[in-house]
Image: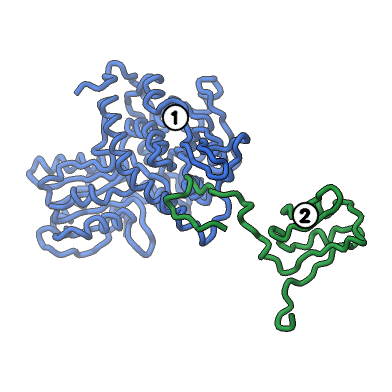
Chain colours: A blue, B green
Amino acid sequence: MIPKVPLDKQIRLNVNGDEAVAYAAKQCLIDVVAAYPITPQTIIVEKFSEFVANGEVHTEFIAVESEHSAMSACIGAAAAGARAFTSTSAQGLALMVETLYIASGLRLPIVMALVNRALSAPINIHCDHSDAYLMRDSGWIQLFVENVQEAYDTTIQAFRIGEDERVQLPVAVNLDGFFLSHTMENIYILPDDVVHEFIGGYRKPPVVKIDYLNKEVSYQLNPAYPLTIGPLDLYDYYFEHKIPQIIAMENALSVIKEVNEEWFALTGRRYGNGLIETTYVEDADVIIVIMGSSAGTVKQVVKKRRGRGEKIGVVRIRSFRPFPYNDVAEALRNAKVVVVMDRGLSFGSFGPLYLEINASISDLSVKPMLLNYIYGLGGRDLSPEMIERVIDEATDVLKRGVIPRKISFVGVRE
Amino acid sequence: MSEPRGWKNLPLGALPYKLSLEYKTGDWRAERPVIDYTKCTRCLICWLFCPEPAIVWDGSNVMIDYDYCKGCGICAYECPVKAISMVPEYRGGSG
């Protein structure tokens, strides 16, 4: 199929992951950006403020004093009907947490680029997914990208997904700190007008019916028809207000898939079914499940071992929230050993991805054996040799039929 | 007060579907302000200070709207001629 915008009509750009996100944001007709710089996200804010200074965007850039204020300003802007964007990493996200729940609870489709970085202490600026796992239950859609091209593509898609009338939720686009944020890659970007059309022009807030005004109004702060947004809601209504939020997350599953297909028709690029990306899973005895940039390395190693006739497959999770339990169960149905690789863990428990995979396979009549490998904390590289050893161990488990350890740590010194 | 609604009939984003006028806060009160009109000079200090606002001015008199007055006592505290007294709503067994 020839995409609507073939590659020769797309623009080749040599950028790192942060710049790719900034270029995507530049094309998305964003009204307000409120952000505070933090490594490894800094380049996004730096680059975007250049666009503002050069008059290349109409965006109001608010240089806030903290990440708590950044998200608060985005919430205020989105409540006024604006398209809002921010970006952060690790400690910045931790400071933002209180307001993350408010953004989702108020159903404001803010987009945030979360450049994944390890949480203190000890202080560390390099990649792991502990910051993303921190916001796991905050009601945000969480998408993980594998490379710089996908960071660009997903940032644009995020506005479409979040602003879809069936969704109306904030979206976090996760890209691995340094591995993607500071690594140059040749990518293809679309002409501005194509992106404008794809995201549907400027943001249009949804319409709500307000009984006491006796009419349908746009869900935004406007003195012409005053609305109270987010007032006190006790045991009499809080529970009822959470149900539509749960349903919106369910709806997001199909919206993410649809947007992925639309993007494919437009650009010729798609990422699995939008929710998960499977490689060689059909006949695989051993399947590795992973998120983020390391999926590329894993696929490379698996491809090599496939060449030797070993039945190994890979499932890359692209949507961590909402979590695609059914798609994952379908992909893992015939596997005998599943290795879940987490770049972060819940102390006293397992890796959060492991828990999701465990829940996904719980209804299968024949369940694969499940192993959890924690890798790459604080930016520790996951080398092809490490992946080889993980595959060797998983193959051994397949042969013996016993699991020596449920949880293992890759590449850590004793 | 109308019947509580289910989630299917609530507007998006935790917007209230009715005005706060329907939410009568008068039953929060432990003490009620009572105005002694023989002392009241109609200076409107109480009307100005009431945070609700639950003090109504009809052009000749100030009156307390007990549907919304929470009994905070600011009016009694601020009244320059001490025309407002706080009276307990309930005196226990002895009435």
Question: What subunit carries mark 1?
Answer: A
| Disc 2 element | strand
Q: Residue at x 9, y 59 (%)?
A: A399
Where residue B33 sits in the image (x, y, percent)?
A: 79, 64
Question: What subunit carries mark 2?
Answer: B
The answer to whether A125 appears left or right of A263 in the picture is: right
- Vertical relation: B93 (above or below) A154: below
Q: Quadrant of residue A366?
A: bottom left
Q: Are marks 2 and 1 on the same chain?
A: no
The residue indicated by pointer 2 is B55
Which is in the foreground here, disc 2 or disc 1?
A: 2
Taking the view exactly as shown, the residue that stands out farthest to the top is A8
The answer to whether A345 appears left or right of A44 in the picture is: left
Q: Quadrant of residue A151?
A: top left
Q: Could you say which is closer to the camera, residue B69 or residue A121?
A: B69
Q: Amino acid at mark 1?
A: Ala
Q: Could you say which is closer to the camera, residue A53 or residue A141?
A: A141
Q: Could you say which is closer to the camera, residue A366 or residue A309?
A: A366
Residue A232: image tag: none
Q: Amino acid at mark 2?
A: Ile
Residue A218 visible to an observer of this rendering: yes
Image quarter in which the C terminus of chain A is found: bottom left
Q: Residue at x 41, y 23 (%)?
A: A196
Residue A39 visible to an observer of this rendering: no
Where residue A270 sits in the image (x, y, percent)?
A: 26, 32
How many numbered discs?
A: 2
Residue A25: image tag: 1
The answer to whether A9 appears left or right of A44 in the picture is: left
